[in-house]
Amino acid sequence: MSAAEFILVEKRERVGLARLNRPKALNALNPQLMLELMGALDDFDADESVGAIVITGDERAFAAGADIKDMALATAVEMLKRDAIGYFDRIRRVKKPVIAAVSGWCLGGGNELALSCDMIVASETARFGQPEINIGVIPGAGGTQRLTRALGKALAMEVILNNRVLTAQEALHYGLVNRVAPLERYLDEALELAGQIAQRAPLALRLAKEAINNAFETSLTEGIANERRAFYLLFSTHDQKEGMAAFIEKRSPDWQGT
Ligand code: DAK
């Protein structure tokens, strides 16, 4: 992709790492940053040498929300036409596992970005919130839906209606994040987790991710039927034959992604 201003990308073995890079604005999400992020995710998703993706910010902030200065004077029609945060829908279409490595502020659209990922690894300093109520609006990129599914109604009401900010430990307790690590370790832990996942059979990973996400989008009957079809489909892959043969032969599997 062309040189990006607000996203730094690198590859660490089979992990694609995208860093939000607007530190002076606490990584506030403006349209250009979102566009660059989506470009990076699309590139990693298409790259067969990448098995999993990590999105991170810096120690002070994962992201302090959508850029308030950018939208303060916008009209409803302008917001609708730009639909900059509509990019969030594209994150859901990334086929590979995506992990958010969160430190510091993770607020508003930043929290919605983290919630759009598949897993979250937090530093002890991470703070999660939806402070839109303070500026006269509500979450607009899925927060009322994803946070409520993650936390339950009672706590989501407090977070969204009264700007309750959750500490990393609270977020762990309520199941919002997968794990909490010391500040100096959170990114390494996220990269290690992504690295382990990236070693696994790619097509099984893809269908497993899809099936889990289905749990939030369909009825139980439909979700189970989808899961079963995906399970049967995997029996047409090389990697299913290889995985089961490797088990029987007591050796490590050699995944081909086919
Ligand atoms: N936007 C723009 N700039 C921001 C920002 C933000 N969200 N957050 C921080 N900054 C900037 C500050 O203005 C400041 O810039 P300068 O004044 O130095 O130029 C710099 O980052 C450092 O911030 P502070 O000086 O305020 O730092 P503190 O440590 O004192 O405070 C803070 C940190 C995170 C508590 C504070 O900065 C803060 O309250 N920030 C705003 C947090 C917030 O309200 N976030 C929610 C934003 S609304 C949509 C869907 C979704 C959304 C939008 C549209 N569509 C479907 C279209 C999402 C909306 C939101 O996220």
Image (cartoon, helix red, strand yellow):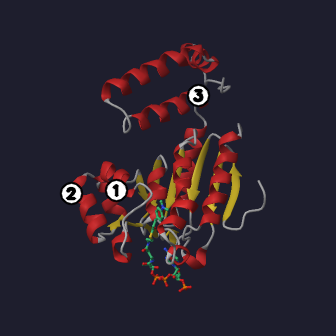
Residue placed farthest to the right in the image? Answer: 2
Q: Counting residues from the N terminus, which is met first, the one under dot 2 or under dot 1?
A: 1
Q: Which residue is mark 3?
A: 203
- Decide: few, some or many residues near mark 2? Use Cα within 10 Å; few <14, some 14-19, many ≥20: few
User: Where, quadrant-wise, is the C terminus in this rendering?
Assistant: top right
Compare residues 232 and 78 and report the one nearer the observer: 78
Query: How many numbered marks are there?
Result: 3
Element type at mark 1: helix
Label 3 or label 1, whichever comes before in sequence order: 1
Instruction: State how far apart marks 3 and 1 are (Cα).
Output: 32 Å
Q: Which residue is mark 1?
A: 144
Label 1, ligand 1: CB separation under 8 Å: no
> How far across and down, in percent of the image, does residue 33 sit?
63, 64
Name the residue at 57% across, 38% down. Answer: 95
Q: Is residue 82 left or right of residue 228?
A: right
The residue that label 2 is drawn on is 154
Residue 143, given in percent of the width and then of the height, sits at 38, 57
User: Of marks 2 and 3, which one's residue comes earlier in the chain?
Assistant: 2
Residue displayed at 64% across by 17% down? 238
